[in-house]
Image (cartoon, rainbow, N blue to C red):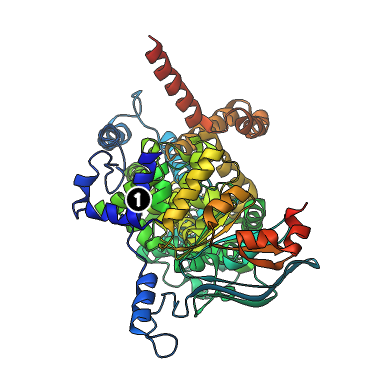
Amino acid sequence: MTTPNVSANLDVAPQPDEQARRAGFALGLPPRAALLPRSGWIALIAFVIAMGICVPIAALVLPESSTFHLSAYSMTLVGKLMCYAIGALALDLVWGYCGILSLGHALFFALGGYAMGMYLMRSIGREGNYQSDLPDFMVFLDWHKLPWYWQGTEHLWYALLLVILVPGILAWVFGFFTFRSRVKGVYLSIITQAMTFAAMLLFYRNETGFGGNNGFTDFKRIAGFPITSASTRTVLFLMTLGVLILAFIAARAIVTSKLGRVVTGVRDGEARLMFLGYSPLAYKLFIWTVSAILCGIAGALYVPQVGIINPNEMSPGNSIEMAIWVAVGGRGTLIGPIIGAFAVNGAKSFFTANFPEYWLFFLGLIFTLVPLLLPNGIMGLIDIALRKKKAGGHSH
Amino acid sequence: MNTLANAYNALIVDLPPLPEMDEKSERNQNGITGLGHVLEPGEIDVSHGTILYLEDVTVSFDGFRALNKLTLSIDVGELRCVIGPNGAGKTTMMDVITGKTRPDSGKVFLGQTFDLTRMSEPVIARTGIGRKFQKPTVFENHPVWENLELAMKTDKGWLASLRSKLDRAAQARIEETLELIHLEADATRYAGELSHGQKQRLEIGMLLMQQPALLLLDEPAAGMTDHETMQLAELLNKLRGTCSMMVVEHDMEFVAALSGDTGRVTVMAEGSVLAHGTLDEVKRNEKVIESYLGR
């Protein structure tokens, strides 16, 4: 019964030149979405140039008496916050975009930090308290040779490789088994929390070979440069800034790609996605592993600036704090978690300096009020403000 | 109404016939059936004219037999309506076919070669079964066009997705489908902002982007107005010949519009097939009247 229609249509057969036939309607989309709008790129480049010039001048050239002098304290503080921001960005990739709330990201952060710490411990050389080739804590434990997993850590390149591989491989293996078993939601969050807690207990033991509860500290130099000198600090600061910006751009590239759209599909409708032929496992593993590696890199930048790493970094509380940064900043936006990390930690620095006894109350208050009043965080607030402004503009 | 029908027609003509169909007709013309034909890996072998074959499929949930020795087969290019009272096991049957539920016993084959009981949901979907859920299931936080892009038949691996670019041909396919489901004006709106009927159309558009060999539609007319229901029936009728379809439905008018005088209708009850035939035949069937229509 459809035959006459079809043949009638075949007479005006569609030409190979489809555009001509469908002149009325075309999507006209670019092959790939732009990473950033033009104004975004200009602002970013201007910011990088300004920081690249101002920070070295403020830290190294200006005398300490100048009001514009950047003290070691504030540089370390901001450097630390930038590392947190990279971690928050990483957590947002899995939580905001893929719907996996990890309460174990502090583990990946700490593992990156420990890998870097191993190199920094080896770089102390014989300048430790016991003047031994071995790190001090090993001498203290009466160990006479390096454990196998410390081999090669005197090389910076190898330590950097570990920074990427250890969190990456752990995350992949953990992810493979949990995602394949279709563990989701709050159960997954609990397992990630258990994972970081187990690792913390493991690292507290002296026999594990990572300095027990003291961890690693008393670093002397990095890549041959004294670690506490102003110029080394400046370089580390700028490197952290560079990594933060690169991480942001890489995350933008991921979430604007089709893979990013599939990942948000996993978050919003995993069953629909499976019946479209996608295997969510591969996508979850990709985003989860990338996130863990990014977190590891953040940890590796954190340790030389802060000068210490110990198992406390793996405590479940730290992972929960990371989730708070993301929630406060705004899940599912990439700028949000960066703002959140700065805002919450800025508040933490202020409170612990002025009202130390109230900080935890304040943190608890944020944790209860933000999801209640600001489900989309600071970015949601900005969004509402922009929309109001737009609406106001129209009515005039 | 007319423009919509024209748009449908345009797409039907534009839709490339599925390779499986081509192969089948070619084989039949050459008189080759069954033994000795060349089997392309990954392609559905329909040399016996059957696209879907279920035999003695049993599924129990805590002792309750949702499917009880269900035996059913669907021919290539057929539009089969399945009716039956609530709890007859229609949705469970779709779950079994799409790999969501594993049967306790029985055979489920796509074509001659694909044992669906051994395949995962994504693999089954990639092999050529599209499924429409009862409730419209679209990605609400994605624009309409991205919903269609995600559904498009292509390499669904993560690396391919990471590298994927929206080329001209892909965009043309999305545009065609948008015209067919009449959502051109809403292409860049979020799917969550669409009305119920628009979401239903979008989901059907997504299924078409998959170019499936077999479409499973679970109560596609649910929650639609009469007018929308008839439009949908027309759309499905136009799709005849491009893919095989199985439609589970309650709305008898809709079933009548789909099956016509000659289309076969399967009546399910208590997990197995109760009756089988044209709509008129099953309506006159004593058992059917007793268990379903009479109530």
Q: Where residue A208 appears, x then y in whole percent?
A: 60, 67
The amino acid marked with disc number 1 is: Asn
Seen in the picture, residue B64 relative to A51 is either above or below; the reply is: below
Label 1: state its secondary structure.
Answer: helix
Asked whether the viewer can see residue B82, the reply is no
At horizontal 40% and vertical 79% (from top left) the residue drawn is B41
At horizontal 47% and vertical 62% (from top left) the residue drawn is A277
Q: Where residue B288 appears, x then y in whole percent?
A: 73, 61
Disc 1: which residue: B9
Residue A390, located in which quarter of the rendered image? Answer: top left
Residue A11, located in which quarter of the rendered image? Answer: bottom left
Seen in the picture, residue A46 relative to B264 is either above or below; the reply is: above
At horizontal 25% and vertical 36% (from top left) the residue drawn is A49
Residue found at the far bottom of this picture: B36
Seen in the picture, residue B184 relative to A383 is either above or below; the reply is: below
Instruction: Tell which of B245 and B251 is nearer to you.
Output: B251
Residue B25, located in which quarter of the rendered image? Answer: bottom left
In the image: residue A367, left or right of residue A162: right
Q: Where residue B208 appears, x then y in whole percent?
A: 42, 55
Q: Chain of mark 1?
A: B
Badge 1: residue crowd in 10 Å (few <14, some 14–19, many ≥20): many
Q: Where residue B195 appears, x then y in whole percent?
A: 52, 36
At horizontal 44% and vertical 78% (from top left) the residue drawn is B45
In the image: residue B107, left or right of residue A89: right
Instruction: Tell which of B79 and B141 is nearer to you.
Output: B79
